[in-house]
Each structure stands twice: as C-alpha cells, then as structure tokens.
Image (spheres, rainbow, N blue to C red):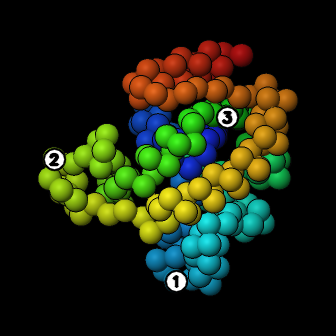
C-alpha cells in the first residue's frame, strides 16, 4: 500500500508518517528529506531546489516528479511506502497514479489528509526543533513538547536546530501556496474514493483512527 500524507506544512505529516511507517512496516519517504540531501551535497538540483525553498515557493512539478519516481524504484519501497510531502498538486497526483499503475498495478493507493487551522500551524512551525541526527529525526516544540535539556535530543543526545525556513513569513507564504493548490488535489483523491480526513489534535487518537481506517480500506 502506498499512503499519501496530505496537509499544509506543519500539520504533523512527518510525525504521524513516521509512526505509521513503524507500525505498518512501510518505508517513510519525505520529499523534504530528499531535497535537503541534495542541498547538503550541493548538487545542481540541490542548488535549484534551495532557491525555491528559501523564497517560500514550491519546487516545480517536473523536478519533484522525477525525483520521487527515482526513489520509488528502489528496493525498500517495492511493497509500499508512506509518502510525506508528495504529491502536492493534482499534476503530481496524476503522475503518481500513472507511475503506480505502470509499475505497481496491484498496489492500493490512499491519501490521509491532516486538517489543522492556519494559526495553529504557524505556532507549531515557528517553535519547531528538529534533531540534527538524520537517523533519529525526532521533532520537538519549544512550547508544547520541549526537550528535557535545551537544544538536545532526548532520544539520541544530538543537537536540535530550527530549520532556516521555519519562520512566520515563509510559513505564511507556504500556507498560501498550499491552499491555492490543495483544493484540486483534495478533489482528485475524493473523486478516486481514496481520501480520509482527520484533525490530529491528539496524536494517539489520530494515529489509531488512521490505522483503523487503513485496515478497513485494505479489505475493500
């Protein structure tokens, strides 16, 4: 099963996606992580991606699609994956549908939408801290989930940092872009009868509701 995590930046797609990944034994693929890897390596693609991210704009469809397609051909995702950050437009959703139809014709595909008010998202993101150890990747919040020791990860002891683009101005711009694109994307999955919407106010409850839905969806 290929599970698409939908929702504006800061809704908790990464956190919930990683929990589902562990519980369902599916690889978690974060488009953001793929992009940041390219940026850190200072590849031509990485430099191009960085220019879009720093301006608060979305990376163009063609760049995103080709990057994710290459990742989905790797062996660790041959039986399914959790897709976090892709697709973000109806064009990308159609490309994913066609890619899976061609390469994974028997695979089920479903989208999970996390719905959170914009003002709450902004508060979450500007206070977000992320573990710099990529193999850990734990996420904290200075207000609602602070680490026991300032700027140190409770899990692995690595340094915690705020991403450069986790500021109010950039987040507000990203939210505006998301809302412009999301209606068509949500409608795409609704029309395919493959959408489940949840408000992740309480993490444990949200995860249970999602997993109950997925179990039922598998049997369809």
Q: Is residue 122 above or below residue 70?
A: above
Q: Secondary structure at mark 2?
A: loop
Measuring from the top left, give residue 123's x and y in whole percent.
Answer: 44, 47
Q: Is 197 placed left or right of 151 in the picture?
A: right
Residue that numbered label 3 is attached to:
111
Separation of marks 2 and 1 at Cα, in angstroms: 34 Å
Measuring from the top left, give residue 14's x and y in whole percent.
Answer: 48, 46
Q: Earlier in the sequence, mark 1 or mark 3?
A: 1
Question: Would residue 148 be seen by someone viewing this image from the given angle?
Answer: yes
User: Which dot marks residue 42?
Assistant: 1
Q: Nearer the viewer, residue 58 or 102?
A: 58
Q: Are marks 2 and 1 in contact (CB under 8 Å)?
A: no
Residue that numbered label 2 is attached to:
148
Camera-side mark, 2 or 1: 2
Say which quadrant the C terminus sits in.
top right
Q: Is 180 placed left or right of 156 in the picture?
A: right
Other-residue count near label 3 (Cα within 10 Å), few / some / many at <14 / 14–19 / ≥20: many
Q: Earlier in the sequence, mark 2 or mark 1?
A: 1
Q: Are marks 1 and 3 in contact (CB under 8 Å)?
A: no
Q: Secondary structure at mark 3?
A: strand
Measuring from the top left, give residue 6's x and y in whole percent.
Answer: 63, 41
> Which residue is pictured at 68% across the width and 53% down the height?
176
Say which quadrant the N terminus sits in.
top right
């Amino acid at each position: 099963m290929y599970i698409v995590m939908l929702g504006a930046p800061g809704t908790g797609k990464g956190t919930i996606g990683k929990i589902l990944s562990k519980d369902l034994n599916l690889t978690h693929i974060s488009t953001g992580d793929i992009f940041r890897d390219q940026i850190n390596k200072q590849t031509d693609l990485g430099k191009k991606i960085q220019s879009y991210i720093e301006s608060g704009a979305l990376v163009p469809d063609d760049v995103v699609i080709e990057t994710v397609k290459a990742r989905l051909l790797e062996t660790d995702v041959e039986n399914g994956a959790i897709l976090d950050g892709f697709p973000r437009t109806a064009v990308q959703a159609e490309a994913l549908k066609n890619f899976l139809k061609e390469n994974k014709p028997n695979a089920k595909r479903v989208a999970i939408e996390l719905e959170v008010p914009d003002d709450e998202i902004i508060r979450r993101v500007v206070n977000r801290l992320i573990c710099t150890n990529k193999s850990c990747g734990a996420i904290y919040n200075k207000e609602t989930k602070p680490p026991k020791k300032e700027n140190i990860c409770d899990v692995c002891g690595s340094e915690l940092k705020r991403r450069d683009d986790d500021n109010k101005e950039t987040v507000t711009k990203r939210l505006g872009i998301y809302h412009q694109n999301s209606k068509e994307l949500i409608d795409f999955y609704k029309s395919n009868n493959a959408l489940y919407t949840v408000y992740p106010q309480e993490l444990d409850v949200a995860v249970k509701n999602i997993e109950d839905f997925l179990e039922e969806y598998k049997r369809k």
